[in-house]
Image (cartoon, helix red, strand yellow):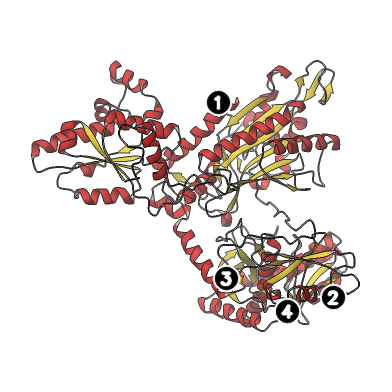
Amino acid sequence: MLVPGRDVRILRTWARGPLTVRHARLSMCAPVSVDARTVPVRPDLPASAAQILNTACSNEAGAYVVARDDRGQPLSLSATPSPSAKYLTFLPFESDDKLAQRTFWLSAAYAQCIAVEQVCKGAICSVPMVTESAGNELDATSGYTIEVLRARMDPPLSLSAHLHEAHLQVDEALQTCVTTVLRSGSPKVADEELSDIERAVKQVCQSGLPLSVEPLPWHEACGLFGHNPLVLRTILDYADHEERVPVVYAESRAISVLPRHGDTTLLRQTKPIKAVKVLGWSTATLQASWALEGSQPLLRIRGIAFPSSNDLQKYKTRMSDLEKSDHRHLGMAQQLFFAHDSSPGSPFVMPHGMRLIRKVERVIRDLYDAFGYEEVQTPQLYRSSLWKQSGHWDKYRDDMFSAQGFSCCGEHDGVFGLKPMNCPGHCVMFAHQPRSYRELPWRLAEFSPLHRNEASGSLSGLTRVRRFHQDDAHVFCMPSQVAREIESMLHMLSLGYRVFGFGDRYELVLSTRPDNFIGDISLWDRAEANLKQALDQCGKPWSLNEGDGAFYGPKIDIRLVDAMGRKHQTATIQLDFQLPERFQLEYAQAPSEEGAHEVRPGYARPVMIHRAILGSFERFLAILVEQCKGWWPFWLSPRQAVVIPAFGSDPESYERTAAYAQEVQATLCGTTEETRMSRNPFLSASMAHHTLQVPSRTRFQVELPPHYLSSSGDTLGRKVRHAQLQRYNFILIVGQQETQSRTINVRLRDEKAAPAWHAGAADSQDSESLRVQDMVWAVAKATFPEKIAADAPPSHDLGTWTLPELRRLFCVLDTLHV
C-alpha cells in the first residue's frame, strides 16, 4: 500500500463570491490583524491591483501582499486584472490562503539569490523552492530554499534551437561545473559568508527593488541565462511542455525564472520584506543520470522572511519550543529509540519504545476485531516477476531494495525485491482460490515490516525511514458494497484518532480523476460518487482536490492536526481499479447483481480498497511523542508507575519494607514472587496457572529500580524528584506504616508543564482541553466515590490505597484509555 502524502498539493482556498472573507491570524504574527478584503473591479476604469486596493482602503493597503481574481488566478499587486474580472480578493501575509505566504517567501528567495551572487563570487543559484507552513503554525521546514553551485559557465552557453540538443548541452555544462566544484572537495559556506549573505539580503529588501515577471519564448529566455545551467534546466522543462517561460526581473535585470509547478506570483517590490533570517546550509545531490553516487556538489541554503521583526522574533521563540519537543530529542531522553550508522533509516527501538508500539497496535487490533478485519502475513521477498505484474517494477523500482542470495543456483536464480507495500501479496492471497460473492467484503490487514529506499539526505528520525511498519489493510468487495465500506472506514479512523487524543482534529480531502487515469470513465464516476456519499454521511466537512487522485482510482486523504497546529498526512482510503485487473482477480457473481465489471459469464472483478489509519507506525509514534512531549496518558505510558520504598533505621523493618515493595511491584505487573525471582513462569504447574489466568491488560508497566532497594541510597525526596523527571504517571510510596497495614501511599505526577491531551472536537467552541491528571482524577472519583468525595478538589496526593483498589483503578484507566 502506498504511504500517502509524499507530495500533496496545497488546496486552493480562495473566495467563491464577492464577499469579504475573514481569515484567522496565525498566532506567531504581529498583534495588528487585517482580514482578507474583496473589492469589486470596475471594467470602465482600468487600473492595477495596487491602485484598486489603495482606492478601497488606503490606510491598510500596506498589509496586503497579493491578490486573487474571481477565477482564483493569482495576481501581483503591480499587475492589471483581466477585463473580465469581476472582483479581486486581497490577501495579507497571515491569510489562510497559502498564496500570500508563498508569494512573500518566493520574493525574499529571489532577493537572496541576488545576495548570494554578490557575496559568493562566481556562484550560480537554482530556481528557489518554497515550503509553506503546515496548518496554522510555522515549523522547522517553513520558508524557502535555494541551491547554489559554486561555479558558472564562462563564456556563457549558446544553446541549439533543437530541444534535444539543448538538453545535451546543458547536461554537459553541468558536468563541467560539478567537476570544477568537486575538484576542491565538498563545497562549504563559511559562517562569515552566511552573515554577509543575510546582510546583503536585508539591503536588497530595504532598497525597495521592483520585481516583475515577463513570459518569453524558451530560446529567448535561454539567451538571458547562458551562464547558469541550473536555471537553464528549468527553462528547458517549460519548453518540454510547450509553455512560455516566466522570467523574473529585478528592475531591468533578469535574475531567474518562476518555479514551474504551483500558482505563483511575486510582490511588486521588496520593500514589504522587513525581516529576513538565513537559517543554515547543507550539501545536496544533483539529480542527474550522470551524477556520481554519493557526491553532493550543491549547497542548499535555507531562509525565511516576515513583514516585521516582531514576527521573526516570535518565529525564533516557537522554533526553540519545537526543538525541545522534537521526537528525536525526546526519544533519546525517554529511552524509546535511537539511530545507528550500521543501518541508516532503520531505528533501533528500545524496550520502552516497544511498549508504546505494542499499545498502539493494540488499539488498531481492537478496531480490526470490531470491524471484521482478518490479520494475515505475507512474504518479505518477492521475485521481480511479481513486481512487474503489479506495475511497481516500472513505476517504483528506484524506491525499492533488491536482494539476491550470495549462493544461488537453479530455480532460485534471479532478482528479488524487498516489499515496499503489501497490496500485491494480498492480491496473490485473493487469487489463491476461487472466490464467491458470499465471501465479500473480504478484509485483510497486515503489520509486516516494509522497506523503501529513501534518499539518505531525506532520512529524519522516525518521520522518514527506510524500514517501517504500517496498519495496512485491503478490502476486496463488490461495487455495491463500496459506499458502505468507505463509511465504515471513516468511522473506524474517527474512533482511532479519538483514542489517541486528537479528537476531531483531522481534515478530509477527496482527490478525483487525474488526466493520466486508467479504466472506464463510468467506473470512475461511480467510485467518486460513492466516496462523496460516504463523506457527506460522515458528518464532517471535507474539501475537493480535483484531478489529484491516483492514476488507478480516486482517494480520500486524511490530514491529522496536532496540538501545535501542524498537519500530518497519515490515513488514506484509495479505490484501485488497476491491481484487480493486473492480477486477473474475479469472484462468482450473485444472481441479478448489478453494476459489476463482468469478465466472463457469471464472474466479475472485485473492487480493491487500500486503507491505512495511522500510516507508518514509526511516523505516527513521532507525532505522538511530539503531541504528548513525553507526558503520556496512563494507558499508553511506557512508565505507568514506580514503587519507592521509604526505609526506616531499623534493619528488620528494612527487610519487611523491601519485601513488600517487591510484592507491590510484582502484583501490579501480573507476576508472582516466584516467577519474579526465577525469571521463568513455567517451572511449575501452579506458576503457569497463575501467569495464564492474569489477562495481559491487567499487567502494568510498574518499575522498582534496583538501587531504590538500597538503604544507603538516595533520600525519599530525591527518589520522588527523579520519578517526577522520568514522568511516571503514579508514584507509589511504601514505608514501614504501609507495610504493616498492607496499603500504598499513591501520588499523581505533577503536570504543571504538561500539554493538554483530549482536545475535543476541533470545531467545537465548548470543548474542554484536559490534562491527563484531570482525567485520572475524574475517573478515580467516579470509580471510588467512597474514597474521594464528589466535591473534593483535584490533588496530587490520592492518599492511602489497598493493592486490590489500586489494581482496579489501573484497570479502569486502561479500559477507558485515560
Q: Position of residue 182 (x, y in %)?
A: 60, 69
Q: CA distance from mark 2 to mark 1?
A: 64 Å
Residue tagged 1: 369
What residue sits right under mark 4 in the picture? 154
**Secondary structure of residue under mark 2:** loop
Q: CA distance from mark 3 to mark 4?
A: 20 Å
Q: Position of residue 764 (x, y in %)?
A: 58, 47
Residue 700 at x, y percent in the picture:
36, 34
Q: Residue at x 27, y 26 (%)?
A: 672
Label 2 to label 3: alpha-carbon separation? 48 Å
Q: Are marks 2 and 1 in contact (CB under 8 Å)?
A: no
Looking at the image, is mark 4 or mark 2 earlier in the sequence? 2
How far apart are the two marked residues, 4 and 2, measured between alpha carbons? 43 Å
Residue 449 occupies quadrant: top right
Q: Which amino acid type is shown beneath numbered disc 4?
A: Asp
**Mark 3 is on which residue type?**
Pro
Image coordinates of residue 345 in percent, x first then y, are 52, 49
Mark 3 and mark 4 lie on one chain; the one further toward the N terminus is: 4
For the question of whether residue 621 can be seen, the reply is yes
Q: How crowded is the residue under tag 1: few (<14 C-alpha within 10 Å), some, or many (20+)? A: few
Question: In the rendered structure, which amino acid carries the disc numbered 2?
Answer: Ala
Q: In the image, which disc is placed on residue 187?
A: 3
Identify residue for label 2: 47
Q: Residue at x 79, y 46 (%)?
A: 514
